[in-house]
């Protein structure tokens, strides 16, 4: 069974801090994704990666960057956190022919 | 422009009755459709899928119907149980392209 692990369930950060959200998957999936979920807005794609060191912008990449140095790990970086980045962040991994598998999410609060 | 639309933000049904969640899409290139279920503070979990070569797929209490000519799909849950209370996301995909999600419908099943 696919396991997608997000390092933190809850985070509280201050405005202007640099924030790292880590995600690891154990099924050798090529594709990994970062979404944010906000009430009334559904799941919005921030960034995704098709392979190591490759990244593509999603629908809302502004204020974020990503890093994929190893196949199993995909990191989301908030260079300078702002209050409008308070959200639930969801990591997912995927291989063609399978369903997207999500981690349990990180609830980030920026004060 | 939203390619996948869930026009009902919320739905409330009585335990034992049928829950029907609807989803419309605009992109005729979509050929694979999925439903995800999400509890608060957890990541979405895959529920059921259907490919465009079928018009119905069943899994226990869950059935997904696809009407390609209307670009419409629906998820039926029968009988509904209080544990089904969650947010349900419809998602669609064309070929190897990334999934496109709807904004979700919050289902409440009342005992």
Image: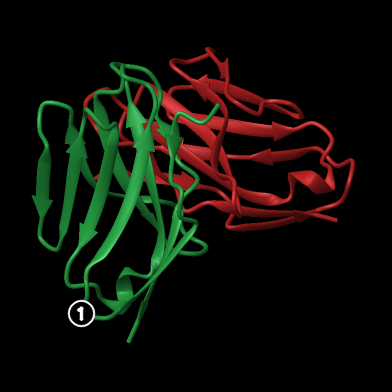
Q: Which residue is at 36% across, 38% downward?
A: B24
Image colour for chain A is red
Q: Which residue is at 63% across, 33% downward?
A: A76
Quarter of the picture containing the N terminus of chain B is: top right
Quarter of the picture containing the C terminus of chain B is: bottom left
Residue at the top extreme? A54
On the image, the x and y values in percent for residue A66 come to 63, 25
Crowding at label 1, few (<14), some or many (≥20) Cα neighbours within 10 Å?
some
Above-or-below relation of A101 to B16: above
Q: Toward the viewer: A29 or B94? A: B94
- Circle 1 — which element? loop
Q: Is residue A74 left or right of residue B47?
A: right
On the image, the x and y values in percent for residue B89 come to 40, 48
Quadrant of res B16? bottom left
- Residue denoted by label 1: B16
Q: Toward the viewer: B11 or A43? A: B11
* Image mark 1: chain: B
On the image, the x and y values in percent for residue A37 come to 57, 47
Image colour for chain B is green
């Amino acid at each position: 069974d696919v396991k997608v692990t997000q390092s933190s369930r809850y985070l509280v950060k201050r405005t202007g801090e640099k924030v790292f959200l880590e995600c690891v998957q154990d099924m050798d999936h090529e594709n990994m994704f970062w979404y944010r979920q906000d009430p009334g807005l559904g799941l919005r794609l921030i960034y995704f990666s098709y392979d190591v060191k490759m990244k593509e912008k999603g629908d809302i990449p502004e204020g974020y960057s990503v890093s994929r140095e190893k196949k199993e790990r995909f990191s989301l970086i908030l260079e300078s956190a702002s209050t409008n980045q308070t959200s639930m962040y969801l990591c997912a991994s995927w291989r063609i022919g399978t369903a997207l598998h999500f981690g349990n999410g990180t609830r980030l609060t920026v004060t | 422009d939203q390619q996948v639309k869930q026009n009902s933000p919320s739905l409330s049904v009585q335990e034992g009755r049928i829950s029907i969640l609807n989803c419309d899409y605009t992109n005729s290139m979509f050929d694979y459709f999925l439903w995800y279920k999400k509890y608060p503070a957890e990541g979405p979990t895959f529920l059921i899928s259907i490919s465009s070569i079928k018009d119905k797929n069943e899994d226990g209490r869950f059935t997904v119907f696809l009407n390609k000519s209307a670009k419409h799909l629906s998820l039926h849950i029968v009988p509904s149980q209080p544990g089904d209370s969650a947010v349900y996301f419809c998602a669609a995909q064309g070929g190897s392209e990334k999934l496109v999600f709807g904004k979700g419908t919050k289902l409440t099943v009342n005992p």
